[in-house]
Amino acid sequence: MNIVIKKWIEPYVLLETSKTLFTMKDYTFNGFNKDEIKAEFLKNLSKAGGTAFGLYMKNVNKFYLFTSTENVDIQKDLLENKLNFTQNDIEYSEDVNTPINLVDLGKAEAGIFIKE
């Protein structure tokens, strides 16, 4: 499952708030290696232990991997309780490329990739 964040949020706030519940690793890319770095990021997300999610934000050339050994409900604990997002602020997508494309087109602020 993937989440598209439509409501504007300061990238620093999103990162720092996520780091209160998770450990973060980033994957920096450029125009030439984005697909390669994305593949590495998604592979590491899929094999991460515990609770994990990935993040991609507008105007930042990085993918972020957040992991926790605790059982954290990303939707409730992070998005709703910590960041005060409502159902009107987000939408869902099964396709991993949809959040990335919407962010790149400026139609979304961020994409969250939840480890299944």
Image: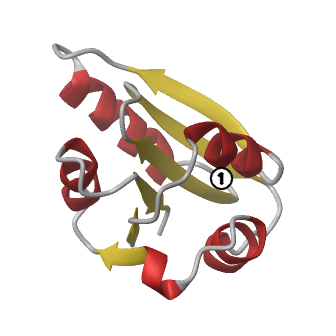
* Image-based side of 106 in relation to 69, left or right: left
Please provide percent x and percent y for residue 87: 49, 86
- Identified at 37% across, 40% down, the residue is 58
Is residue 22 found left or right of 111 in the rendered image? right
The residue depicted at 39 percent of the width and 65 percent of the height is: 6
Counting other residues with Cα less than 10 Å from the Cα at mark 1, is it few (<14), some (14-19), or many (20 or more)?
few
x then y, percent, for residue 17: 75, 50
Total numbered labels: 1
Q: What amino acid does circle 1 point to?
A: Gly
Q: Is residue 43 above or below residue 71?
A: above
Residue placed under numbered mark 1 in the picture? 49
Residue visible at 26% across and 49% down?
Answer: 100
Residue 72, image quadrant: bottom right
Which quadrant is home to the N terminus? Answer: bottom left
Q: Is residue 97 above or below residue 44?
A: below
- Foreground residue among 41 and 97: 97
